[in-house]
């Protein structure tokens, strides 16, 4: 029993997690890559990440400086949840709109990433619009809002909050 306790204590101390609220450190923040066609969605993820880190007490400095929080936007889009028949043919009854990404900390230039959040995802449900033009406008707004939520969720994970990776 004593050996198991020692193993748990040592294992807990060596997990590799570093909080971004370390005294005296000012973090840079940058987008490493985005697999999303709309660059505004990626900008919203970075803005949400910045907002969440500041709200959580992390100090941000020069965007290109180190240590640095880096973010990757993996995917943003929608899928049909169910199909219905209407006058113009089959169409979506509801849409699931989601965005996913990950963030990590690099302590020095060329350094190994630490505190990786892993892939995280945010989801919202929406109704399809009557016309393609209005659908495009509404869809862009939904994706931007999800980008901001994703950034906030990534910040919370970097600050030590634990919860589901999918929302």
Image (cartoon, grey):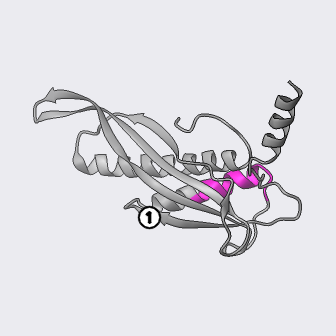
Give the residue drawn at x 79%, y 66%.
26
Label 1 sits on residue? 39
Give the residue drawn at x 68%, y 75%.
109
Looking at the rendering, the stretch of residues picked out in magenta corresponds to: 46-58
Query: Is 47 contained in the magenta span?
Result: yes
User: Looking at the picture, how far across and down is residue 136, in whole percent?
Assistant: 31, 51
Using residue 93 as the reference point, say whether residue 116 is left or right of it. Answer: right
Using residue 7 as the reference point, say whether residue 71 is left or right of it. Answer: left
Crowding around mark 1 (Cα neighbors within 10 Å: few <14, some 14 to 19, many 20+) is few
Give the residue drawn at x 59%, y 51%.
151
Using residue 74 as the reference point, say whether residue 112 is left or right of it. Answer: right
**Predominant SS along the magenta part:** helix
The image shows residue 60, relative to residue 137, as above or below, that is: below
The image shows residue 119, relative to residue 72, as above or below, that is: above
The image shows residue 166, relative to residue 40, as above or below, that is: above
Write down the quadrant of residue 69 in the picture.
Answer: bottom right
- Total number of numbered discs in the rendering: 1
User: Looking at the picture, how far across and down is residue 86, in whole percent?
Assistant: 14, 29
User: Looking at the picture, how far across and down is residue 116, in whole percent?
Assistant: 63, 53
């Amino acid at each position: 029993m004593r050996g198991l306790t020692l193993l748990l204590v040592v294992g807990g101390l060596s997990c590799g997690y570093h909080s971004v609220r370390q005294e005296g450190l000012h973090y840079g923040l940058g987008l490493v890559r985005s697999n999303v066609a709309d660059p505004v969605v990626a900008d919203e993820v970075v803005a949400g990440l910045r907002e969440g880190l500041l709200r959580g007490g992390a100090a941000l400095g020069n965007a290109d400086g180190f240590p640095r929080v880096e973010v990757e936007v993996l995917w943003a889009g929608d899928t049909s949840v169910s199909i219905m028949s209407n006058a113009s043919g089959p169409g979506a009854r509801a849409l699931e709109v989601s965005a996913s990404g990950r963030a990590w900390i690099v302590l020095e230039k060329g350094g190994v990433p630490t505190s990786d959040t892993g892939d995280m995802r945010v989801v919202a449900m929406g109704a399809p619009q009557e016309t393609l033009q209005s659908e495009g406008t509404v869809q862009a707004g939904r994706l931007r809002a999800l980008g901001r939520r994703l950034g906030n969720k990534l910040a919370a994970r970097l600050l030590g909050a634990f919860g589901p990776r999918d929302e």
